[in-house]
Amino acid sequence: MKTWIAFWNILKKDIQNYYLKPPNISWGIIFPLSWTLMQLIRSSGGMNMSDIRTLLPGLMGMSVLFGTTSMLAVTITFERKGRSFDRLLLAPISLSTLVAAKLSGAILFGVFNAFVPMLFASFFVDLTGINWGVVLLAVFLIAVTSTLLGLLIAVSAKEVFEAQTLSNFFRFPMLFLCGLFLPVSSLPIFLRPISYLLPLTYGTDLLSGAVLGSGTLPTLLSILILLVFAAGLFAFCQHSIRRKWIL
Amino acid sequence: MGTTGIVNVTNLSKRYGNFIAVNGISFSIRKGEIFGFLGPNGAGKTTTINMMIGLARPSGGSIEIDGIDAVKNVKKAQSIMGIVSDESNLYDEMDGFENLCFCGSLYGMRREEREQRAKELLAQFDLAKAGKRPFKAYSKGMRRKLTIAAGIIHRPEILFLDEPTTGIDVESARQIRHLLLELKQGGTTIFITTHYIEDAERICDRIAFIVGGSIVANGTVSELMKSVSHGYAIRLTADQNLEPFTEDMQQHFEGCTVKVNENHEVTMVSEERISLSPVLQYLDRKGISVFEAKEIRPSLEDVFVKITGIEAEKLKKEKEKGGMAK
């Protein structure tokens, strides 16, 4: 019970202090919206509403990726710099509970970001036939793995600007490597192995399968790979925190 | 070193590569006392406290807190500790009340309990009116007080404070000393690191001096004083130069060494306690008026300087620097 009280209050504090701030809410809305418009204009030289559904998996994956990685990396680096993070490290809760609480806020923020393009799309196109269960699971797993990447960045960065730079270093190549807007099959052959080393590739494939029916990998395999990525990254993040933050 | 205290530290050491930050130190803290850990910057104070609270891993030795092995079972030990770091590390966006409630929740306190306790602490720390103000709007002294309140919200058995009065105004520092004495009266054991020797002398029951990662002295204030004080001394300020009377005084007060200083001052030192009234009567008979007469006792600062060889002036400069930096 004591652990749950601590977990819930860390999560609540992060949501109130960071994720519900107007700049972050507007980022969560404006960023996917502007990408949708850009893609629509680019795809047909003019507005074509039927393209929106095709763009959805990529837009959702990108929204989660950008929302989660930078937010967690920046908030943790910010708390580390002000030493308020020490307060959490010194609380009588396990490191797993602390990490899970910090991740949960960013994951929820990522899930919210993912459904912004979906919500906008619902006004313009027919969304019947979507496998909502797989969509939800895919969004959740993309959010978990992306948030853990953000945590990994936070462990490596000392300053907020370092965290932002490192986030961008990872994120922008992922836009092109993970099949968000270009199919992995259209990438040069030497780049494809890199794509399959990135969890977002599997998440995007799951979304494509659920929204468009055009996934290239078996659904269960993608889910399993994402779960392995999540468990591996969680263990690695915990190990890195113990090594780097408890001197 | 005995293992009778609520905290027993034995042969504790910490290395960073080839650099030895803490070199096999041992000490015990008794239940209900204020234990001061004094030393200049870089002496190993913060490294020691970090190892005790679980923010740094010892390279060797053991830490036992209330029977708990604080190295192997750090989370259990943390549940009975209150920790106040050398920075006021609460959340700027949250107000004083919210900050306290949040800190209580980290120790598993239920909502009603932590809210009640937060109100009590805001009143006790004279912050009730500022309870709804964001932490970022607090003055340095208020921030420090709220940080200490956050450290005791869960009623810890032992409170660790790293430089609690550094960089704050005189009045806030006085209030904090007063609050620490109140906590001690309530039964809380307190471990405090500081380079403010006067603070330690005022509130600590026992003190350890750490220099270069090693403890060079450890004991009560009077024990430490005794270790460097050889005899008793009095100082008198008269209305005239006492140089012509030196020899006569030396003969009259057998066993005393009489030394005349500037500004009509004379110092008398003896192995035995010197009674003031015979001296005053003697000077009166010689037609000398005395403006001031006092027994001279060494200060803790004198003791520190003698034991460590570190000039008090250097320490003062360090604390001024520390104060300005915060």
Image: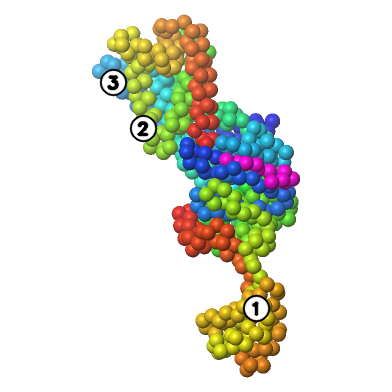
Instruction: Output the chain of dot 3.
Output: A
Question: Image point 56% across, 81% down: which residue?
Answer: B260
Q: Amino acid at mark 1?
A: Cys
Name the residue at 74% across, 45% down. Answer: B4
The numbered mark at residue B256 is: 1
The amino acid type found where label 2 is placed reads: Thr
Judge if badges 3 and 2 mark residues of a common chain.
yes
Q: In the rendered structure, does residue B2 fall within the stretch colored magenta?
A: yes
Instruction: Please rate how many residues cluster around mark 3, counting C-alpha atoms within 10 Å: few if below 14, some from 14 to 19, many from 20.
Output: few
Tell me where residue B78 sits by quadrant: top right
Q: Which residue is mark 2?
A: A165
Q: Residues within 10 Å of mark 2 (few under 14, many from 20)?
A: some
Q: Residue furthest left?
A: A45
Identify the coloring: rainbow
Disc 3: which residue: A41
Q: Which residues are magenta?
A: B1-13
Q: Can you give x and y, in whole percent of width and height, for residue A147 in the image?
A: 48, 26
Quarter residue A206 falls in? top left
The Cα–Cα distance between marks 1 and 2, rounded to whole angstroms, is: 74 Å
Q: Are marks 1 and 2 in contact (CB under 8 Å)?
A: no
On whether residue A172 falls in the magenta region, the answer is: no
Q: Residues within 10 Å of mark 1 (few under 14, many from 20)?
A: some
Lateral position of residue A3 relative to residue B19, left or right: right
> Residue A167: percent from the left, percent from the top?
39, 29
**Residue A192 percent across, percent down from the top left:** 34, 11
Q: Nearer the viewer, residue A184 or B97?
A: A184
Residue type, numbered disc 3: Ile
